[in-house]
Every structure is written in structure tokens, then in C-alpha cells.
Image (tube, helix red, strand yellow):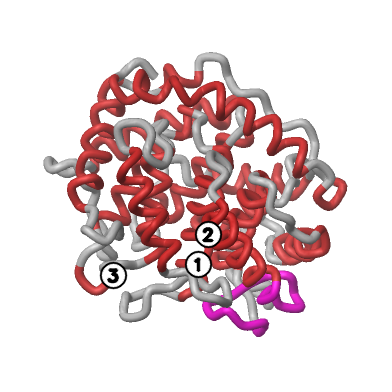
Amino acid sequence: MTSQTGRRGRWLTGLVSALAVTAATLWQGAGGLAAEAPLVEAEAGRMISPAAEKAIENGLRYLARAQHEDGSFASGGYRGNVAISGLAGLAFLASGSTPNRGPYGENVDRAVRYIMDRTQESGFITAPGSASHGPMYGHGFAALCLAECYGMSAEEELRDKLARAVNLIVNTQNDEGGWRYQPRRLDADISVTICQVMALRAARNAGIEVPRETIDKCIAYVRRCQNPDGGFMYMASGGESAFGRSAAGVVALHSAGVYEGPELAKGIQYLMGFLPGQSSAASAGSYYYYAHYYAVQAMWRQGGTFWQRWYPAIRDELVERQSSDGSWLSPISPEYATAMSCIVLQVPNNYLPILQR
């Protein structure tokens, strides 16, 4: 990436490269399935077009303006939502800023402080009074943000909050191997499960202990959710495949250390049926940003021609969707859609440790 955003982030490259090596070493052997991850294309940064560079910068500026005094994000009923605050923090991290370092360092730090302040003694991260599609969604995204930031610092309080959040995830995994809306060991679904396993992966990368049994059970659960067509059902009890949940299923396997196998090959082929610009189902619906947040990660991990076809398609589509004020719109909140879009567009930067290949 050759824009102002890219230049500002280059100071982080050495740190991120070191984190990538550490992450790969720490997670080797999850389920005995961690194979050599695909190599990062040497020219990946060049995939961010000038129009996308401008869109990213405008999007990040919008988020910076939209941040509340307490460090949180989102408006309306979702104001203070910990998931959206975590996603906004990740969007800034993906540009190369870290807590108190870089052009958006202060924004990252304030978001992290907000999340830490909403971490209960039990480790549950929640903002009572803020609308949510399910508290464990918020917990997973917020814990992921904490883990990515802890991997770039050694702050003891941050480690303590993150460790508590991880313990809550481990202790609320149900007998099937997944998670659901509430921090209780009852049922499970693929969309909440992916949030938790990504948080666990990022925490493990940063040196927080995660039981091997937890990951093995999660892998088994996600595999049971796959349909014969390669897509994934919402719950293991049955159901049809859909784009968003299938992208989540593939990334859940990647996050658990599964990098190859028939389930991934089938999953990627299923997702290719939703290539942006060629599938109306991939360009509409209330889960648009959610689906593409995971789909771009799936293709980034897969690499090769899959990535080369997918990223330019979603890049150009998102650039077209951006509003004049730098935001992207969603019924949930523009901060949610903007954070998701900025993360998607910045994947080739390779700055987020959770996305290191």
C-alpha cells in the first residue's frame, strides 16, 4: 500500500512479522491439523487501489470523529456496544496504529480502555443498556480486540482482563463444542462460535493459555455444522447453508488451526458461488458486512487465485457503497458497517496478527 495510510503503518511491519512467527509457533498442532499456511503474496499491498486507499482513509477519519468521549462507538440504541467498539479498534489496528502509537493510536487506546472498563470480574465483557444481537457476540469481538492489542504491549491490567475474558469463553463452551448468545453452557450456533474461537486464537497468539481440549471440541463442532454442499448450517441440529454462516465456518476452522482438508476445499468452493459482482445474494441482505468480513478472511487464508479473484471484487464493491462522509450504512449503525468495511479493505496490509499468514 503506497498511500498515506500505508506509509504511516510501515513502522509496524517488523513487529507484526515477529508476531506472525510467534503466532504460527504457538498454534501448531491444534487438533494435529495445523499445516504450513499459504505464503503471503509479495505484491499483496498493491491490491489496494488508489480509490480503496482514499476510501480507507475517509472511513478511518469518520470512525475517529464518531468515537464518543468514553472511548466507545455506535449510535442510537447500539451506542456503547462492545462489539462495535472492538471492531472499530480493529479497523484502526489494521491501518498500522497501535495503542498510543500511530495516527490513530489514541483512538485505539480509548477503545481498549472502554472495553476493559466493561469487563466484569467474571471476565464477561458487556455494556448493559446497549442493544445487542446477543451478548456473546459482543464478548467475542471485544475480547479479540483486547487480544490483538495485548500482543502489541505488555500491560499487566490488559493481560488480566484478557485472561478473564478467555476463561469465560472456555468455561461457557457447551457439550457440542460451540457457544450461543448467552454466557451459559446450553446450545450453540456457528455465528457465535466463530466470534469466540477467533478471540481464543488471538489470545493464544499473544501468550494466553487456551486448553487444547477447547479447540479440539470446537473443530469437531464446526465440522458437524457443514452440509454436503460445502456450506454450513446455523446449528448442528440441521438447516440449509447460507453465505454468511458458511464464511464464518471456514474462518472458524482456520482460526482453530485447520489449514487444509476436504472440509475447507468444499467450503471455499461453496463461497466462490457468492463472488461479489456475480451473485446478488452476496450484495444484499442484513448480514452483508458480517458475511464479507468473514469471506475476505477465508479467501486471504486460502490465497492463490481465490484471493486474487475475491479481493478486487469486494474492494470495488465497497468503494462504490461508501457514503460521502466516509461512512458505510447499516440498520445496526454506520460505525458498525464502517469498521467492518475498513477491516475488509485493509486485509492486504497484513497488520492484524490474527490475519497473519
- Do labels 3 and 2 touch, CB within 8 Å? no
Identify the image quadrant of the C terminus. top right
Whether residue 49 sits left or right of residue 12 in the image: it is left
Q: Is residue 64 above or below residue 126?
A: above
Give whichever of 199, 322 is nearer the camera: 199
Q: Is residue 249 above or below residue 343?
A: below
| Label 2, residues with CA under 10 Å away: few <14, some 14-19, many ≥20 | many
Question: Alpha carbon of mark 1 to alpha carbon of mark 2: how far?
Answer: 6 Å
Identify the image quadrant of the N terminus. top left
Residue 110 in percent (x, y) is at 33, 52
Residue 31 falls within the magenta-colored stretch: no
N-terminal-most mark, 3 or 2: 3
- Do labels 1 and 3 touch, CB within 8 Å? no
The residue located at (76%, 42%) in the rendering is 26
Disc 3 marks a residue whose amino acid type is Tyr
Whether residue 133 sits left or right of residue 233 in the image: it is left
Residue that carries the numbered disc 1 in the rendered image: 139
Residue that carries the numbered disc 2 in the rendered image: 143
* Mark 1 element type: helix
Residue 250 in percent (x, y) is at 63, 50
Residue 181 falls within the magenta-colored stretch: yes
Task: Write down the region rendered in magenta.
Answer: 171-186
Q: Is residue 112 above or below residue 277?
A: below
The residue located at (50%, 67%) in the rendering is 139
Disc 2 marks a residue whose amino acid type is Ala
* Mark 2 element type: helix
Question: Alpha carbon of mark 3 to alpha carbon of mark 2: how far?
Answer: 18 Å
Seen from this angle, which residue lies furthest left?
324
Residue that carries the numbered disc 3 in the rendered image: 78
Give whichever of 36, 84 is nearer the camera: 84
